[in-house]
Image (cartoon, coloured by chain):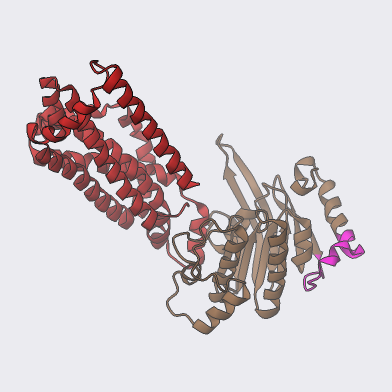
Amino acid sequence: MRKNNFKTQLYFLLTLLFVYILLFEFILPVNKVLPKPSLLIESFSSIWLDYNLLTSMALTTTAVYLSLILSFAVIFFLSKQFIYYIISFKDIYDSIEFYKYIPSLFAVIIFVYWFNDSILAEFIFGFVFASALLKISLFDELKNIKEEYYIAARNMGLNEKEIFKKVIFRSLEPALFKKLIKIHYSLWMIILIYEYIDGNGFGGAYKKILLYGDFAGIFVLTIIISLLIWIGSLLLKFIQAKYFFWES
Amino acid sequence: MIEIKNLSKEFVDDYGVKNILFKNISFKIVDNEFTSIIAPIGAGKSSLLKIVCGIEKNYSGSFTNDFKNPIFLIPSKPASFPWLTTKENILFGLKNVDENNLKKIIEFVGLDGYESHIPNNKSYGFRFRILLAQALIRNSSLILLDEPFTLMDAQTRSEILILIKELREKFEISFLMATTNINDALFLSDKIYLMKKNPGEIIKTIENDFARKKDFSIFNSNEFIKKREEIINTFKSLDYSNMLADLIV
């Protein structure tokens, strides 16, 4: 079934590629919608030097994945240790839900305003952003605690603190990791916006590409970033399948 | 033995109104006996079981427990930890384990060969067996069953019914089951309490002698049908809200 699904996706992509090549290489080579396929291939090799993409890639991917790994480690570790106490703040979280109405861009602007174009600030921003989203996800998941697990743990003679640490938090882990995969996509987007504003990394490269009016460059850079996001999500899904495989 | 005297419980509903869930409930759970409470949905059966196993603390009345070993509650949705294997689930939280005893228990509940299986996506019957094994390995004196068979298919249900009867032959263990199902209660119990709702009160006690018989043909015996009628008529004599779910057809 899964194999068939993969085949269907592959056929769909190949068809799209075929139509794209046919349409934009031969029928409409000059247009403002999509660049010529041959131009994209040429641009693929030159763009690395033109915009110093290797350094940009190192900076952006480190900012995204280091923030993600650190926030995962810190939030998972701390929440697991203190979930028994965190649960008593569940209602306070409901009362500060107004954060949903504050645009994420505000956080970017204020960080850039405070720290200018500091690379360290970008890492801190990524970490704070990912940690905040993960913490919010945890509070959301605390509403879904299953009584059956609590009863099962009580049957085993565990005390309240142990129940929350060893059973309740563990039961929430797959849902939290699922959220982490979603946060991964949001983090990529917000870091790119951050970099676009402060001029570093891939976001900075976008800014330069737009400044030079490099039409093919926009697409090549997007393909590179998309590949990186895809590889990242594949890795995360692999970890999910290996360590957080169960449905509660 | 557990003796419950004048147990009452109140709760505040979503509109802030104080309600009586049940009042003046008194009954005994005797050693090695299977006791059932038949009551309609909403009578407070689950809360009663939670009070007996110590999860629910907010009640009035007296409650004495002479059982030396732990009380084990099997909820209507039996939960095993899906991140652990069947064997790890059974042994969760235990420090010293007698491997021979463990092997015997696993065989008895019908989980041999499944020790390394993850119970994720397994049937409720499978999970029920894990929970039974957990109770047995912990030498529980009393197992509380909260609507235990509602999520099981007919085949699994009959297997588990027989398993419980066999368990009672082999181990010295007491049961308290809360159910809406008359047949299950009559098939398994030594004593049955009928409980009404609005508010929850025990209205009748029925002594039953089908508990040790393992043959399903007793469902067709005159005595069984008579007892079943007696229970149905008791609930029918009350208001409509006290009709048992499986009788409203």
Q: Residue at x 59, y 63 (%)?
A: B126
Vertical relation: A101 (above or below) B53: above
> Percent from the top left, x then y, of residue B225?
88, 59
| Relative image position of residue A105 (x, y in whole percent) | 22, 27
Residue at (23% x, 33% y) in the render = A190
Residue A195: quadrant of the picture: top left
Residue A41 coordinates in the image, percent (x, y): 20, 32
The chain assigned the colour brown in the figure is B
Residue A246 location, x and y as percent?
45, 54
Q: Quadrant of residue A218?
A: top left
Q: Nearer the viewer, residue B50 or A184?
A: A184
Query: Going 75% across and 41% down the picture, which residue do you hit?
Result: B241
Q: Nearer the viewer, residue B147 or B141?
A: B147
Range drawn in magenta:
B207-227
Residue B245 part of the magenta segment: no
Seen in the picture, residue B52 relative to B20 is either above or below; the reply is below
A210 is higher (above) or lower (below) than B136: above
